[in-house]
Image: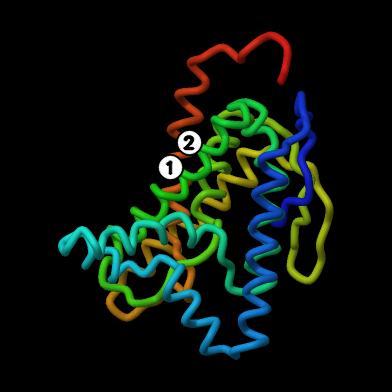
Amino acid sequence: MIPLRDANPTRRWPIVTVLLIAACVAVFVAELGVEANGGGQALERLFRDWGLVPRDVSAALGGSSAALDRELPTVVTSLFLHGGWIHLGGNMLYLWIFGNNVEDRLGRIGFVLFYLFGGVVASATQVFVDPSSPIPVVGASGAIAAVLGAYVVLYPRARVLSLVFLGFFYQLLQVPAIVVLGLWFVLQLVSGLASLGPTSASGGVALFAHIGGFVFGATAGGVLLTRRPRQGRLA
């Protein structure tokens, strides 16, 4: 099931969502330049330097303050790196569809803080579950998972036009957000638990970053439900 758009209007244009997408695209273009000039090894070095490496973060937490100062920025910089066109395109599609409504509810500054903190929580979850991994974690998926978690709690009945595959056939259907995003989370959870086995692997996907981000976002969405939407003129 691939979401294409939602039927959930916003009160104002989602400038923060658009700027986040633009930033990720700009960084990806820079990645292409690095690879074109230095090859795959240069790109791998970029990911090691600016991606989140759980082993390095774990070591820094128990090491010197200089090591911690060097590794902590990667918690944020890793959110803007992507491993390929499909990785970037999938993340940006989900951010575009669901980010605008969460931004509308939180406000622009609130959404920036929520997005970044959701990414931090997602990264921390991945480090906690797999602290010895030497593989760089890159991508906005954890922060976007927080957006999805908030969206499904705030707008569970919103209709999402989705491409639904039925064997060799597909169909466009209007599906409630709770179904689309609920199935997405269940898939992440099942795959993540399966990856904990001694001989299994997660295929290079930071599944627990997705899980941690989604749970954080859903919790934040639940808190928002206890508050009345702000009224008045929009800035």
Q: Position of residue 114 (x, y in %)?
A: 50, 37
* Residue 129 in which image quadrant: bottom left
Packing grade of label 2 (10 A; few <14, some 14-19, many >=20) is: many
Horizontal side, residue 130 vs residue 31: left or right: left
The N terminus sits in image quarter:
bottom right
Q: Residues within 10 Å of mark 1 (few under 14, many from 20)?
A: many
As shown in the figure, which amino acid type bears the numbered disc 2?
Ala
x%, y% of residue 153?
55, 31
Which residue is at a point 69% across and 62% down the rendered structure image? 25
Q: What type is the residue that disc 1 sits on?
A: Val
Q: From the image, which quarter does the C terminus lie in? A: top right
What x and y, as percent, mark residue 170?
A: 81, 62
Labels 2 and 1 touching (C-beta < 8 A): yes
Classify mark 1: helix, strand or loop. Answer: helix
Q: Which one is in front, 69 or 48?
A: 69
Q: Residue at x 46, y 68 (%)?
A: 50
The reply, left or right, for residue 69 in relation to residue 232 is left
The picture places residue 39, in percent across and down from the top left corner, at 60, 90
Q: Which residue is mark 1?
A: 215
Q: Give the residue number, with chain letter if any, for mark 2.
A: 218
Quarter holding residue 178: top right
* Frontmost residue, 224 versus 2: 224
Q: Compared to 78, does 48 lie above or below?
A: below
Label 2: which secondary element: helix
